[in-house]
Amino acid sequence: MHRRSVLAALLLSIASLAGAQGSYPTKPITMVVPFPPGGLADLVGRPVAEAMSRDLGQNVIVENKGGAGGGIGMAHAAKAQPDGYTVLMALSSFTVIPEADKVLGRAPMYALNSLRPIARITADPTVLAVRADSPWKTVKDFVEDARKRPGAINYGSSGNYGTMHVPMEILSQNAGIKMTHVPFTGAGPAVVALLSGQIDAVSSGPATVLQHVKAGKLRVLGHWGNAKLESMPEVPSLKSAGYNAEYAQWSGLFVPAGTPEPVVQRLRKAAQFAANDAKVKDTILNAGSPVLYQDTPDFEKYVATDAKNMTEVVRKIGKVE
């Protein structure tokens, strides 16, 4: 009789869990954006969160948690309850930070397998932006000046080993130049510093600088891609200028590992809805980045490949204090 009671209780528990997952979500969801407002993750995260809210029937609330090149927010999401009520809008620094922590001789803030990929939303090469009143009109001008004045040109980033630091290091290695790196808490503050004259250049996603380019305040000299940019078709690639420098800044949705499969599939559906939503596409494109959606299976492979490539890059960069 006792065994029957235990079995009945177990079956009831399983049924309750399945029912809870089947009715997901029953309360608002937090989308962690691991950078301050104004950067690519925020520019992508907000319209995606709004569209997902419409599909899920619950508010998806953006929470900006900047610092450490995105590491603080990503670590926060990795440690969250795997119940589907915390999601992460990460950038490509996601695959860099754990290896950077190892290079620096400290315990990684999070492990790559502590977060599960759901969907890629964008994937853009970063662009080299300077003030419109700067003396550099081309990438060649910029590089030649950097060679003449080692360390004199300073550039801003979202933090050590972040998505704005890594491409500049790739360019420095390939062009044989030395610049001074000035880390900020995110792309937004770095661009503000560029506009105010505190720094000389940034490498960022097109969406972060496009409005300032249109306003005549910034000039884009080149990009780290291998095809024309949709938002800036006139801008040449660094490769065409003779530098073997490539880098893509992607944005994608993740959940803590261990999130129940039915919840993962529901979020996957909501992400697909958002990526296909006309309002989302227009908002992100107007900001400077076209939606380049990748569904869960392909995004998982993409992240794994990117992690392998970035591990090699970080080891070449070495220890940065």
Image (tube, rainbow, N blue to C red):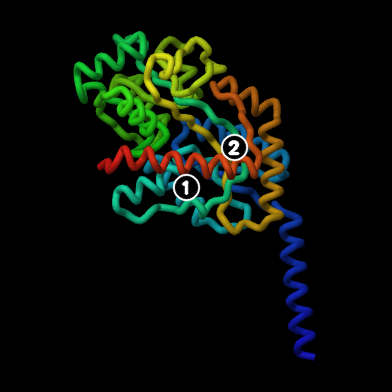
Which residue: 70% across, 26% down? 278
Q: Position of residue 305 (x, y in %)?
A: 51, 41
Quarter of the image holding residue 317? top left
- Inspect this view and state whether residue 26 appears: no
Which residue: 45% across, 21% down? 209
State the mark number for residue 74: 1
| Mark 1 surroundings: few (<14), some (14-19) or many (≥20) residues within 10 A | many
Q: Is residue 188 left or right of residue 266?
A: left
Does label 1 or label 2 sit earlier along the sequence? 1
Q: In whole angstroms, how far apart are the C-alphas of marks 1 and 2?
A: 16 Å
Q: Is residue 125 left or right of residue 56?
A: left
Q: Quadrant of the C terminus?
A: top left
Q: Position of residue 1 (x, y in %)?
A: 80, 91
User: Depth check: 260 or 80 in front?
Assistant: 260
User: What type is the residue that disc 1 sits on?
Assistant: Met
Q: Position of residue 68 (x, y in %)?
A: 37, 43
Which residue: 40% across, 45% down? 97
State the mark number for residue 120: 2
